[in-house]
Image (cartoon, rainbow, N blue to C red):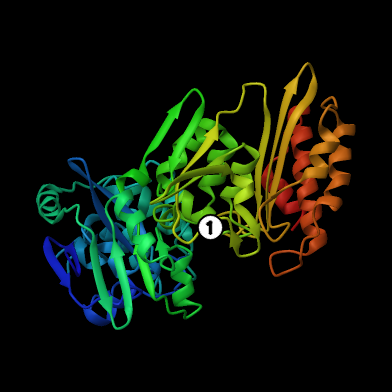
């Protein structure tokens, strides 16, 4: 099969000659005339381009709000699309839109379609609908109305009826296990449906770029203006989207989206659930994957420091077999990871913490919601007989890669859990890290912020409640 096929308002849309890095936003506005979807930031931050994507899951559709500005057209294949024009007949408003108009929830109106789509998803039970309305809208920015009237309108329309029967039937007819491929000039793209097909493709095209949610790769195109020659889209492989929880821990497929993993991570430890809640806005978590966050090797990726501190292992797969490594060994240097060209990330295993483990995971950023870390840190202390028998401390934003603090860990092992031990660990941070200064924070700020996480751990365990928000306010 070749070309991209998806549903829009019940009709099948076929695109034969597909530029693999053309965005859905550009296609809607300049090819289909659906200009209700707006371009704001072109990097998945403002939410003005929010649309709903529906995927067939069993006998139901899993709707989720995503950013059209960084979603490449092949990622739509076999799915259903809903834009703001889909919500009602021409010149008519649905109940949510009517409520927003009556409530004064829009001024310039530029961001309004994105807010409407995020809230419509909440009203029809889309992914993340159970979250507080503020969390649902954390990925939508308004520059003139103010959020008060928007939040008020959202609370007045808690649910809307939505009949997916016809869409389900149409998606079932579109479903196929065949690998989809296409060519655009000299550039090629593929959509495998099994891990075996993916392994075979990588053996033939070891230089191909793997794309899962495109929440990072999308910016390479929209902001970096890069040309990607060969792409393999892996978002439709069921084996990479599986999760298994048991007494030993959580095994999570590399293609599991953060929105889908949120509850499972929170069951491992509440701090892990809170960290995931703050990874981008809901649109980013609805697209971005746990494996993708690791694979891009960013020194400020939110997931790796916490996963390293929890003792996670990573499994890579190829046509020749599998290999497993501690997650921290995957990161070799800035922009360099231990993945061979013909390998792909298959799964991550996170051991379940012991009930007596002392754990703190914290993210410090200039904005609380939907922002990149200045520092992200995780501390795990394994206690035996009142002493620290083992520890794992990892930080992001402090070095060229997410990295453990070996000197800091050595200062803690064998010590009783005390303020003196915490002070020794803080003093060792300068030996483990020499952070850079950039727009997100100075080197001095980063060292002090890392130290503040240790102090917070001590005060929390000693019974003094210290909120992360207070720490952020204290340190800017």
Residue 157 visible in rendering: no
Q: Position of residue 302 (x, y in %)?
A: 59, 52
Q: Which residue is mark 1?
A: 370
Q: Position of residue 408 (x, y in %)?
A: 81, 42
Task: Report the residue at 83% width, 48% height from top.
Answer: 429
Q: Image quarter for residue 357?
A: top right
Q: Is residue 341 above or below residue 402?
A: below
Task: Report the residue at 79% width, 59% height from top.
Answer: 445
Q: Image quarter for residue 79?
A: bottom left
Q: Position of residue 364 (x, y in %)?
A: 67, 53
Identify the element where label 1 is drawn: loop
Give the quarter of the figure containing the C terminus. Answer: bottom right
Task: Report the residue at 27% width, 53% height from top.
Answer: 193
Q: How many marks?
A: 1
For this orientation, the residue located farthest to the front is 320
Name the side, left or right, on which 15 lies relative to 30.
left
Q: Is residue 28 above or below residue 95?
A: below
Q: Image quarter for residue 332?
A: bottom right
- 150 or 53, which lies in front? 53
Q: Position of residue 78 (x, y in %)?
A: 20, 58
Residue 422 visible in rendering: yes
Name the side, left or right, on which 257 lies relative to 195.
right
- 15 or 469, which lies in front? 15
């Amino acid at each position: 099969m070749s070309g991209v096929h998806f549903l829009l308002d019940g009709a099948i849309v076929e695109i034969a000659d597909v530029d693999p890095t053309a965005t859905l936003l550009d296609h809607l506005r300049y090819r289909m005339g659906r200009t209700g979807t707006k371009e704001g930031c072109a990097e998945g931050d403002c939410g003005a381009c929010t649309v709903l994507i529906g995927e067939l899951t069993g006998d139901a559709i899993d709707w989720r709000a995503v950013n059209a500005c960084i979603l490449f057209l092949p990622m739509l294949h076999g799915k259903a699309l809903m834009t703001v024009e889909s919500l009602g007949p021409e010149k008519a408003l649905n109940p949510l839109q009517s409520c927003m108009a009556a409530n004064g929830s829009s001024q310039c109106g530029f961001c309004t379609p994105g807010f409407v789509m995020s809230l419509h998803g909440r009203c029809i039970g889309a992914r993340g609908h159970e979250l507080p309305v503020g969390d649902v809208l954390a990925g939508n920015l308004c520059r003139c109305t103010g959020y008060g009237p928007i939040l008020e309108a959202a609370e007045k329309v808690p649910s809307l009826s939505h009949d997916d029967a016809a869409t389900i039937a149409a998606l079932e007819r579109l479903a196929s296990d065949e690998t989809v491929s296409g060519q655009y000039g000299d550039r090629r793209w593929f959509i495998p449906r099994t891990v075996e097909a993916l392994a075979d493709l990588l053996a033939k095209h070891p230089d191909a770029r793997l794309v899962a949610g495109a929440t990072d790769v999308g910016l390479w195109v929209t902001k970096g203006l890069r040309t990607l020659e060969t792409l393999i889209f892996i978002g439709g492989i069921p084996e990479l989207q599986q999760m298994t929880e048991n007494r030993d821990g959580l095994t999570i497929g590399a293609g599991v989206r953060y929105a889908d993993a949120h509850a499972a991570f929170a069951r491992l430890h509440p701090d892990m659930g809170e960290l995931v809640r703050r990874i981008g806005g809901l649109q980013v978590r609805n697209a971005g994957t746990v494996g993708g966050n690791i694979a891009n090797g960013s020194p400020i990726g939110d997931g790796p420091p916490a996963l390293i501190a929890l003792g996670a292992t990573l499994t890579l797969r190829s046509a020749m077999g599998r290999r497993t490594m501690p997650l921290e060994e995957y990161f070799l240097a800035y922009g360099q990871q231990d993945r061979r060209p013909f390998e792909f990330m298959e799964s991550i295993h996170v051991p379940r913490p012991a009930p007596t483990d002392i754990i703190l995971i914290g993210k410090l950023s200039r904005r609380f919601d939907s922002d990149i870390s200045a520092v992200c840190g995780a501390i795990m202390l394994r206690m035996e007989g009142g002493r620290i028998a083992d520890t794992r401390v990892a930080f992001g934003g402090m070095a060229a890669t997410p990295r453990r603090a070996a000197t800091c860990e050595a200062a803690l092992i064998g010590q009783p859990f005390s303020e003196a031990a915490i002070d020794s660990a803080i003093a060792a941070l300068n030996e483990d890290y020499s952070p850079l200064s950039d727009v997100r924070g100075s080197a001095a700020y980063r060292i002090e912020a890392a130290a503040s996480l240790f102090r917070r751990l001590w005060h929390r365990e000693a019974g003094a409640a210290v909120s992360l928000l207070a720490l952020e306010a204290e340190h800017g």
